[in-house]
Amino acid sequence: MRVHKFSGLLLACVSFGAQATEVALAGVFPGKALVLINNGAPRALAVGASTPEGVRIVAVDDSGATVDVDGKRRRLVVGEQTVSVGATGGASESVVLQGDSRGHFHAQGAVNGVAIRFLVDTGATSVALGRSDALRAGVAYTRGEPRIMETANGQARGWLVSLDSVRINGITLRNVPGVVLEVDMPQALLGMSFLNRMDMRREGGALYLRQRY
């Protein structure tokens, strides 16, 4: 397993359904969110306001907004670039990640319902968490199987665990094999224990993930 120190921009916009409605957050004001819907002009919407496209503003705070789009709730954060999420003509969920300037893909997600920032790493066997992220997510990692892991900074002690849930926007997997390191990591790694259940396709600067099972 590799652990890298990367920097990059997290990506966030949401789209739903066969006729997808895309929503991006351009800014926040007291009680209002400045949103772009389907790449249209920015609109300032108050909390509780709804649009003809089926977008409703649920809550706004200093860093972002919670929105309902066609009955599905998502969190948007100011300053994030576009990620499209939603069902693509069927039951399977899909995510589209836009790469950063160095070609790395980042995604906002959650482990056991706790927000986690991920770096997509096809070289990592499992979803990998640092100690602090694991504690926040309530992972009892010391009950897992102990291992010595090779990292970019040398060897570190780790534990093999099973994560109750791992979510990337609209995709949630249960009982995902993971590893927790005793040291903190710059960000969690979205490894192959999650990715091998996806159809992955890269086109230009975009990475398409669609859940297979």
Image (cartoon, grey):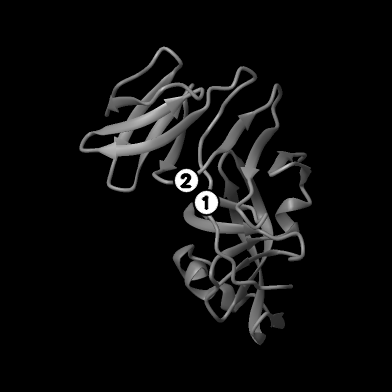
Q: Is residue 174 left or right of residue 124?
A: left
Q: On the image, numbered disc 1 is attached to which residue? A: 10
Indicate which disc, 2 or 1, sits on the residue closer to the N terminus.
1
Residue occupying the point 59% across, 35% down: 85
Residue 14 position in % (x across, y down): 52, 33
Neighbourhood count class around disc 2 (C-alpha, 10 Å): few under 14, some 14–19, many 20 upward: some
Query: Cβ–Cβ below 8 Å for labels 2 and 1?
Result: yes
Give the answer, above or below, for where 181 lies relative to 96: below
Q: Nearer the viewer, residue 40 or 51?
A: 40
> Which label belongs to residue 80?
2
Residue 161 position in % (x across, y down): 65, 69
Residue 206 position in % (x across, y down): 68, 42
Quarter that holds the C terminus = top right
Residue projecting furthest to the left: 30
Q: Nearer the viewer, residue 29 or 52?
A: 29
SS under mark 1: loop
Question: At label 1, which amino acid type do we have?
Answer: Leu
> Which label belongs to residue 36?
none
Residue projecting furthest to the bottom: 155
SS under mark 2: loop
Question: At label 2, which amino acid type do we have?
Answer: Glu
Q: Is residue 201 left or right of residue 46?
A: right
Residue 76 position in % (x across, y down): 43, 40
